[in-house]
Image (cartoon, rainbow, N blue to C red):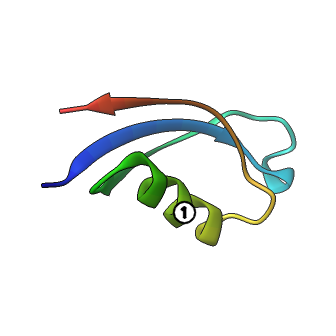
Amino acid sequence: MTYKWLVTFTTPASKGKFLKETVEATDWFYAKALLESRYVGIKILNYTSVR
């Protein structure tokens, strides 16, 4: 079963601007790993499970 996570984060390239992305994964740790592999220097500010 997979879940969707709405993640708010910043990256050095965004220069402090908040970015949002929905990630689909089996659990939060996998979703976080996906984002960390996609964005260099990511700082996750918030995440919530969405349906």
Q: Please name the residue that numbered disc 1 is placed on.
A: 33
Which quadrant holds residue 51? top left
Near mark 1 (Cα within 10 A), the count class, few <14, some 14-19 or many ≥20, is few
Which quadrant of the figure contains the N terminus? bottom left
Task: Give coordinates of residue 11: x percent, y percent.
Answer: 77, 50
Q: Residue at x 23, y 46 (%)?
A: 3
Q: Residue at x 34, y 51 (%)?
A: 27
Taking 48 as reference, is 12 above or below it? below
Say whether residue 27 is left or right of residue 41. left
Q: What amino acid does circle 1 point to?
A: Ala
Say whether residue 49 is left or right of residue 11. left
Most extreme residue toward the bottom is 37
Taking 17 as reference, is 2 above or below it? below
Say whether residue 49 is left or right of residue 36. left
Task: Give coordinates of residue 50: x percent, y percent.
Answer: 26, 31
**Label 1 SS:** helix
Q: Nearer the viewer, residue 19 or 26?
A: 26
> Total marks drawn?
1
Q: Nearer the viewer, residue 15 or 48?
A: 48
Which quadrant holds residue 48? top left
Q: Nearer the viewer, residue 30 or 37?
A: 30
Task: Give coordinates of residue 16: x percent, y percent.
Answer: 84, 36
Q: Residue at x 68, y 33 (%)?
A: 18
